[in-house]
């Protein structure tokens, strides 16, 4: 039973024998790096970069859900990338709109 499931995964059109498996797997590196950047101060974050990562994640999540065969590896990494980027954007916006930082900018 387990052997047939492993063989089905191995032979899947988006399985480990194809680029459709490995490209999203390595894309996790970008997502993990963005999660690690949560320890950075918010002033070091970039609106442009985080917006691009959010859009990339959302676009590819949608694409991976409508293509055939379904690529759930790409879907999961794209959702993870979008979520991490939205979190970073919220940190940056919250930091930039805080009253303390607005007073410092006014001086």
Image (spheres, rainbow, N blue to C red):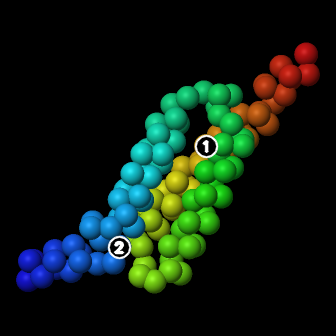
Q: Residue at x 27, y 67 (%)?
A: 17
Q: Name the residue carrying label 2.
A: 14
Q: Which quadrant of the figure contains the C terminus?
A: top right
Residue 71, by quadrant, is bottom left
Assign a secondary structure to mark 1. Answer: helix
Q: Nearer the viewer, mark 1 or mark 2?
A: 2
Is 14 in front, or is 42?
14
Q: Give the residue displayed 72% in from the left and 41% down from the top.
A: 47
Taking the view exactly as shown, the residue that stands out farthest to the front is 18
The residue located at (16%, 74%) in the rendering is 6
Q: x%, y% of residue 66?
A: 53, 81
Instruction: State the residue in front, 41 or 97.
Output: 41
Label 1 neighbour load within 10 Å: few <14, some 14-19, many 20+: many
Q: Which residue carries the number 1 mark?
A: 88
On-image quarter of the N terminus: bottom left
On screen, residue 7 versus residue 70, left or right, reads: left
């Amino acid at each position: 039973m387990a052997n047939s499931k492993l063989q089905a995964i191995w032979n899947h059109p988006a399985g480990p024998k194809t680029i459709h498996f490995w490209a999203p797997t390595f894309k996790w590196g970008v997502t993990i790096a963005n999660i690690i950047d949560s320890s950075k101060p918010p002033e070091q974050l970039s609106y442009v970069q985080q917006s691009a990562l959010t859009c990339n994640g959302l676009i590819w999540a949608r694409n991976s859900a409508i293509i055939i065969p379904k690529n759930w590896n790409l879907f999961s990494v794209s959702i993870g990338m979008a979520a991490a980027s939205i979190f970073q954007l919220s940190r940056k916006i919250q930091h930039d709109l805080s009253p303390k930082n607005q007073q410092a900018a006014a001086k």
